[in-house]
Image (spheres, rainbow, N blue to C red):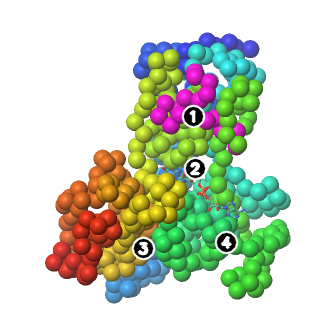
């Protein structure tokens, strides 16, 4: 048995763990990072990057399929599933390689391989080979897919997103359970790559949206492309010789049976915390066993233990894992003299088409905060007739902006919109700068661009705040199709 004494120990070498390691090291202390799985991060191996690579292939197929609407008729149109997956995996491996090179630059004595669990508040056991004692610690153990246990009966025909990026070729058909972020991104991409897709959800929930108008608009768009029932009544699922049989009731209540090659469970992710032995520490945990932590210091109820990234279950996104890792690592390094870190305005983007995005406070949160008394105003713009969006034939979607009555402060946005990744950044910067709607309207807008849709929604919002006249007509002098 090996014994190590360290100033700071980081559990997990994903995005949050690596950020924590580097910031803790800046305090010139002995820092050890423990990794129980493969180096390379969830983002690069099975998350952000391979999913966006698959979506890029789907986008390319979609552009070709749409070309005739412009009078452009491409020749033979064929999707080679093997080639699609081969590029996804080759580029994914390249991204993983970049992370591995960065891990290689970390001194060997700072890295320990194995699964860590707490023995007491300052001591960890790594597998059965190393005992580490530390002054402060960061839990950065990430998350994993979760699905109902009964589905395990489907064996290898039940897949999660991790499995998709190991495929050598595309299946003929899939049933995707969970129209959340992962389900919609993968499901729409597979559909556009020629895979027959059925998507089933519960409770009508879609991609983390909370605004009913945006959700209805997005749902209508997806349902026009592939089978989507966000509030499905699914009965029996049975593995048969050449796939999985699924019984469900359709929208009219009629019983249907489909046979698919594979079932993809995209029904959410759970923080990797239950095998850490946290219950022995007397740490305050939520009902899922996740450590409760201060949002600005990432400190748990045990002052020397911090949590970051998906393990914190605060906002399971890449840039959040990085920011939280930096704050947690800095505080573990400087412990006990901890500092509050900068938390950014919420920014989340779903890479569907149209993209979905959320900025600042969402509709449901504002309803909770302000009640139903009209203390926040809503402005909206549809992209159906928006100039630039029509020009490029991407005129689908709805943007809803929220602002505080009285102050005119911009509070947040939800959208299903073309180029939402860019619109959302613009709005997140305005949100973090605490701009008012009037200040945002003073900003420049080019013509013709999709951002003009933001101006339309801002004008509508301004009218709702009673700080300007309502739009009686579209602003043609601003440029056709504002
Ligand atoms: C399909 C998919 C697509 C995504 N797309 C996006 C996107 O486009 N944009 C975005 O912002 N986010 C996206 N995300 C989310 C993003 O990938 C995560 O939020 C982020 O990678 C989390 O980083 P992390 O450091 O918390 O966890 P990870 O990178 O998972 O790191 C945790 C590490 O801890 C290790 N570990 C766990 N338990 C132990 C233990 N007991 N002992 C030692 N080591 C342990 C694990 O092996 C792992 O290496 C996506 C996720 C998925 C699954
Ligand atoms: N573009 C991005 O930034 C991106 C991409 C992928 C993942 N992520 C991150 O990963 C997190 C996890 O994504 P996710 O899609 O796994 O979770 P999610 O919580 O977004 O979606 C899970 C969905 O599954 C549904 N569901 C639950 N049980 C079900 C059942 N039995 N049958 C059918 N549907 C069921 C839920 O209602 C929900 O709509 C996201 O919240 C996000 O933070 C981000």
Q: Which of marks 4 and 1 is nearer the N terminus?
A: 4
286 to 229, vertically: above or below: above
- Name the element at disc 3: loop
Q: Earlier in the sequence, mark 4 or mark 2?
A: 2
Is residue 407 among what the camera can see?
yes
Q: Name the residue under label 4.
A: 231
Disc 2 residue: CB within 8 Å of ligand 1: yes
- Name the element at disc 4: loop
Q: Earlier in the sequence, mark 3 or mark 4?
A: 4
Q: Where is residue 135 in the image (x, y as percent from the top left)?
A: 58, 15
Q: Residue at x 40, y 36 (%)?
A: 342
Magenta region, residue range: 288-304
Q: In which quarter of the image is ligand 2?
A: bottom right
User: What separation in Å lies between label 3 and label 4 (alpha carbons)?
Assistant: 21 Å
Q: Mark 1 points at which residue?
A: 293
Q: Name the residue under label 2.
A: 46
């Amino acid at each position: 048995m090996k014994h190590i004494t360290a100033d700071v120990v980081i559990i997990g070498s994903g995005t949050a763990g690596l950020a924590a390691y580097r910031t803790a090291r800046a305090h010139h202390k002995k820092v050890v990072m423990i990794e129980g799985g493969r180096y390379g991060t969830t983002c690069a191996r099975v998350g952000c990057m391979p999913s966006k690579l698959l979506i890029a292939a789907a986008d390319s197929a979609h552009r070709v399929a749409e070309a005739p609407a412009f009078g452009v008729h491409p020749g033979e149109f064929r999707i080679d599933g093997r080639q699609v997956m081969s590029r996804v995996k080759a580029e994914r491996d390249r991204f993983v390689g970049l992370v591995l090179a960065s891990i290689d630059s970390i001194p060997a004595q700072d890295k320990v391989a194995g699964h860590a669990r707490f023995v007491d508040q300052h001591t960890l056991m790594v597998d059965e080979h190393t005992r580490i004692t530390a002054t402060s610690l960061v839990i950065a153990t990430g998350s994993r897919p979760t699905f109902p246990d009964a589905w395990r009966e489907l064996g290898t025909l039940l897949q999660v997103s991790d499995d998709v990026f190991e495929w050598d070729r595309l299946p003929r058909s899939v049933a995707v359970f969970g129209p959340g972020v992962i389900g919609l991104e993968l499901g729409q991409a597979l559909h556009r790559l020629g895979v027959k897709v059925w998507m089933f959800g519960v409770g009508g929930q879609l991609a983390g949206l909370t605004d009913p108008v945006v959700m209805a608009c997005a749902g209508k768009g997806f349902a026009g492309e592939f089978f989507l029932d966000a509030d499905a009544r699914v009965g029996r699922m049975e593995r048969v010789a050449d796939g999985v049989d699924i019984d469900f009731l359709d929208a009219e209540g009629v019983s249907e049976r489909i046979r698919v090659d594979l079932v993809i469970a995209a029904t959410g992710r759970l923080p990797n915390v239950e095998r850490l032995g946290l219950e022995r520490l007397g740490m305050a945990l939520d009902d899922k066993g996740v450590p409760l932590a201060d949002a600005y210091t990432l400190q748990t109820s045990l002052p020397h233990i911090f949590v970051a990234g998906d393990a914190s279950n605060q906002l399971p996104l890449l840039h959040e894992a990085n920011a939280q890792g930096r704050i947690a690592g800095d505080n573990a390094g400087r412990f006990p003299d901890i500092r509050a870190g900068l938390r950014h305005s919420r920014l989340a983007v779903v890479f569907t088409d149209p993209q979905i995005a959320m900025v600042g406070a969402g509709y449901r949160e504002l309803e909770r905060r302000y009640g139903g008394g009209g203390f926040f105003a809503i402005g909206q713009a549809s992209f159906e007739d928006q100039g630039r969006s029509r020009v490029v034939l991407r005129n689908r979607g709805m943007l809803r902006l929220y602002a505080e009555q009285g102050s005119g402060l911009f509070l947040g946005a939800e959208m299903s919109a073309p180029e939402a990744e860019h619109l959302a950044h613009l709005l997140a910067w305005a949100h973090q700068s605490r701009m008012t709607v009037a200040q945002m309207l003073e900003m420049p807008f080019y013509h013709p661009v999709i951002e003009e849709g933001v101006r339309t929604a801002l004008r509508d919002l301004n009218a709702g705040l009673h700080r300007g006249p309502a739009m009686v007509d579209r602003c043609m002098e601003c440029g056709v199709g504002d």
